[in-house]
Image (cartoon, rainbow, N blue to C red):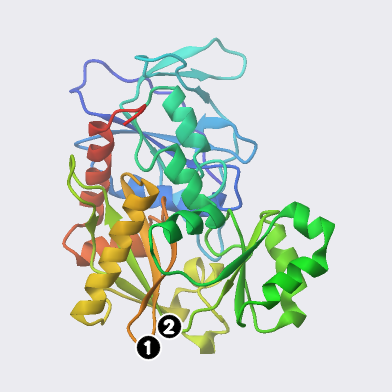
């Protein structure tokens, strides 16, 4: 749980620093993961360079000021962080040229809290990472870190992401999409369509992350239960042929001006199958780190490394991403690179692969945060 914060308006007598609103929490099933991401950013952001305003979004959608304390936001085996929605409510500006936040405490009049220069939206999953928050910030005329509405929405929906990236000529595994209407109308037909794929398959919610609701299925017997488990997170489900290969990731940063995207050295994820995790699931990612080996840079040939970075940059530009993204691939025994997916707001704790890959490429975690904020300050909202 997070502690509440007492509104502290900006002091105009202090030296001017860009004011960064760090926004986290949200309505999705990845609420706790978002809080953990925010804990890392709040710890590492340069306070001499930026003034920070932590804003939590509760599960009911309330925007509230929270205490500037990373400790309650940590996700550990014994603690699941949550924004409770108590305290001063935050209201965004509603006209162009106005960057002033307004706060409202119960029983009191509205009060100006001061201007915000840029928003750092650290939300994962629907109602945050999927273009909805980005559209809200565009309407509010507030600069923000990360991709815009279309790239965020497309990157969140694995179905349309695959259509766009496949259209760009990037190699991907075969897949079948099962919509809510198809499943309710004829389950047997939907499962028959999946039967054309090569097993094992991975069954996933189309619009969720952090491996929530994901199952590995070895044959048709387990398919219906896996689809129902995915539907608990999203009524739209995607089923993909499993690729036998090493799990390789690459971090991407927006280029400066018209420069091409910058890519990190790739990293590798290896799950110890003796740990009871059949793949890189939620528990392995966040609660059982001993079961996973994260290596960066990955032990790849120069040719495969170059191809991973090319695929990552191509995916970033094909989707129209801005700011940051993490591109996940498989590398087969034959050295083929197969794209898995792109994440427009990847896990961002100091231990997450995205900052670790940049660390191995010469950009520290605090420097990475600074780079992203500066990119957002340089970029206008609206059509670009």
Residue receiving disc 1: 333
Query: Picture coordinates of residue 288 (x, y %)?
Result: 50, 74
Residue receiving disc 2: 245
Query: Picture coordinates of residue 276 (x, y %)?
Result: 58, 84
**How many numbered marks appear?**
2
Is 205 above or below relative to 81? below
Per the rendering, the mark at residue 57 is none
Q: Quadrant of residue 365?
A: bottom left
Q: Secondary structure at mark 1?
A: loop
| Label whose residue precedes the other's in the sequence (1 or 2) | 2
Is 28 above or below relative to 23? below
| Residue 129 shows up from this direction | no
Q: Quadrant of the C terminus?
A: top left
Is 38 above or below relative to 162? above
Foreground residue, 180 or 211? 180
Q: CA distance from mark 1 to mark 2?
A: 6 Å
Q: Quadrant of residue 27?
A: top right
Left of 258 or right of it: where is 353? right
Foreground residue, 122 or 310? 310
Disc 1, disc 2: CB below 8 Å?
yes
Query: Picture coordinates of residue 296 (x, y %)?
Result: 27, 73
């Amino acid at each position: 749980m997070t502690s509440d914060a007492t509104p502290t308006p900006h002091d105009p007598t202090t030296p001017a620093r860009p004011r960064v609103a760090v926004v986290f929490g949200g309505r999705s099933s990845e609420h706790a993961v978002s809080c953990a991401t925010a804990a890392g950013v709040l710890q590492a952001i340069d306070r001499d360079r930026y003034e920070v305003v932590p804003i939590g979004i509760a599960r009911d959608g309330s925007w509230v000021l929270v205490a500037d304390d990373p400790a309650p936001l940590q996700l550990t085996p014994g603690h699941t962080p949550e924004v409770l929605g108590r305290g001063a409510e935050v209201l965004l500006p509603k006209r162009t040229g106005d960057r002033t936040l307004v706060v409202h405490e119960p029983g009191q009049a509205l009060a100006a809290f001061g201007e915000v220069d840029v928003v750092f939206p650290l939300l994962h999953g629907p109602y945050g990472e999927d273009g909805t928050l980005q559209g809200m910030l565009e309407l509010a005329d507030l600069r923000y870190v990360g991709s815009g509405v279309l790239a965020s929405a497309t990157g969140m929906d694995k179905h349309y992401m695959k259509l766009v990236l496949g259209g760009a000529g990037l190699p991907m595994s075969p897949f079948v999409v099962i919509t809510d209407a198809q499943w309710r109308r004829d389950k047997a037909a939907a499962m028959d369509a999946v039967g054309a794929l090569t097993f094992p398959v991975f069954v996933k919610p189309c619009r969720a992350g952090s491996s929530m609701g994901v199952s590995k299925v070895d044959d048709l017997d387990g398919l219906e239960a896996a689809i129902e488990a995915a539907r608990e997170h999203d009524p739209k489900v995607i089923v993909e042929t499993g690729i036998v290969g090493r799990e390789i990731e690459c971090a991407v940063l927006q280029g400066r001006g018209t420069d091409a995207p910058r890519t990190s050295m790739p990293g590798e994820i290896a799950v110890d199958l003796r740990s009871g995790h059949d793949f890189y699931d939620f528990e392995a990612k966040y609660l059982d780190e001993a079961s996973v080996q994260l290596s960066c840079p990955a032990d790849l040939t120069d040719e495969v490394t170059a191809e991973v970075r090319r695929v990552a940059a191509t995916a970033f530009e094909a989707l129209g991403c801005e700011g940051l993204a993490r591109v996940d691939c498989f590398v087969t025994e034959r050295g083929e690179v197969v794209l898995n997916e792109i994440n427009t707001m990847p896990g961002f704790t100091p231990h997450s692969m995205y900052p670790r890959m940049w660390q191995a490429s010469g950009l520290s975690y605090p420097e990475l945060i600074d780079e992203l904020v500066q990119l957002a300050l340089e970029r206008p909202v609206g059509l670009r």
